[in-house]
Amino acid sequence: MTSPHLLWLLSGVGAILLVASIAGEVLRKRLSADGHNSVIENLNARIAAWWVMVILLGIAFLAGKTGVVLLFALASFAALREFLTLTTHSRADHWSLLACFFIVLPLQYYFVLIDWYGMYAVFIPVHVFLLLPVLSALRGSTKDFLVRVSETQWALMICVYCVSHVPALLYLQIPGFEGRNVILIAYLIFVVQLSDVMQYVWGKLVGRTKIAPTLSPSKTWEGFIGGTLTATLVGTSLWWMTPFTILQAAGMCLILTLMGFFGGLVMSAIKRDRGVKDWGHLIPGHGGFIDRLDSVIFAAPIFFHVTRYYWSLT
Amino acid sequence: MITALRVFAAGVVGQAISVFARFMTAPRAIWQGIEPVPRQRVYFANHSSNGDFVLLWTVLPAPLRRQTRPVAALDYWLKSPLRAFIGRDVFNAVLIDRRPEARTTDPVAQMVEALDKGASLILFPEGQRNMSEEALLPFKSGLYHLAKTRPEVDLVPVWIANLNKVMPKGEIIPVPLICTLTFGAALHLSPDEAKDAFLTRASSALLALAPAPLGKA
């Protein structure tokens, strides 16, 4: 499943991380020799975690379709575990929660694996949406019923349905692009995450005007514009490895970075409401899986459908 | 040969239980009042699930974990050969008899003996699983007697959050949710502190570690 373009992209990311690691070390030597500067320490933790994430993704790409589907199924599991930890549920929801993890999640990724588009596109929004509340209703507790079932459905849509559109990209049939679909995943993740990273960098360097002070103190107009433009520019310059023309790639990158930004905004609103800073703690420096995936979660289904509608035969 | 096999099997089963606990609950230890250093300690925690001591044991760094023994009920852990294997061999539990009329050895003496051999302990001072709506049941006096007999040992409160949602009462299959374990500052018995005063102080020190309910933070 490798292609020369994928190797180019991965080596490019490796080079960026190498530069970042060296810069991080220099900053630590200069400003945080005894580990007291929390911004520098967090920066270095983030870079270290990036290495792990990129290497895992690289291994999954080497392992082929099954590897990629499995990796994102595991990411979904971790994300769902974080999301449902913060939602409202009572003892009466125990069966529906079990069904989310051990029936809905595996089935959704199985449908992706066997390329049953007609099923995985409607499974959670239709079938699960109608059947899951029945499990909770059968247990008889009506207190906060609508809140409980809505929040559980939201958790599934965000953590399972949306995330599963990333590996689904492998199955699009784009004439002249056969055997290179993995580039679509790498491109999606690269552009969206680069936008996140550059928003962080621009925000730290010149960020002044807060976009939504009640949601997130770190999101500024300067960071947002600088980040999305940088990522769009870099993403557009990589048009030659995608099925898109230069102009189409620019439009696609704009969609990706905007959706990614919206994802961060919406997921911040939920965190704020629940009174937590991060979704979890499993990715050092970044927080939880959802903290790192929020932008991909919002960008992936849109990227999938736009690409499918205009470029794919299926 | 048989012994070596048993020790090996206990090691493997211990690791397996620990991996399973991590998979289900991604437990997070917050060392709020103490550091995870190899000091002799009695960790005392709230008790709402049979998985409590497994989770506490799992989040301890390996060198500390090897020295830490849960204090558990003999009548529960010796009921079947499998439970006995897990209780005795895997977790090396100090098995105490909760029934005053039936027991031949004093639980406090057993705990003190384990401490004198250098072990740290995991203790649930409520004495039983808390199935009530109250955050904590009244503490049994064991913690006080332990503090009185060995006043130099650190008594560390540990609040285990969310495990009762992972496996609510009456359910068999656990649901994956993140659990948090907050380690508070160590307590010691003051020179003239009375039993009830000490138990109340220990209980409120533990309760103070409980996280605020969602949306109220």
Image: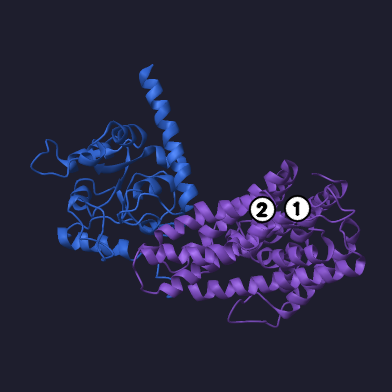
Q: Name the element at disc 1.
A: helix
CA gap between label 2 and label 1 equals 8 Å
Residue pictured at 24% horizontal, 62% vertical: B132
The C terminus of chain A, quarter of image? bottom right
* Numbered-mark total: 2
What color is chain A drawn in?
purple
The reply to whether the C-beta atoms of the residues labelled 2 and 1 are less than 8 Å apart is yes
Relative placement, left or right, of A241 versus B58 is right
Mark 2 falls within which chain?
A
Residue A171 tag number:
1
Amino acid on which the number 1 mark rests in the picture: Tyr
What color is chain B drawn in?
blue
Q: Which residue is mark 2?
A: A112
Whole-percent x and y of residue A126? 57, 66
Q: Are marks 2 and 1 on the same chain?
A: yes
Above or below, A173 relative to A152: above
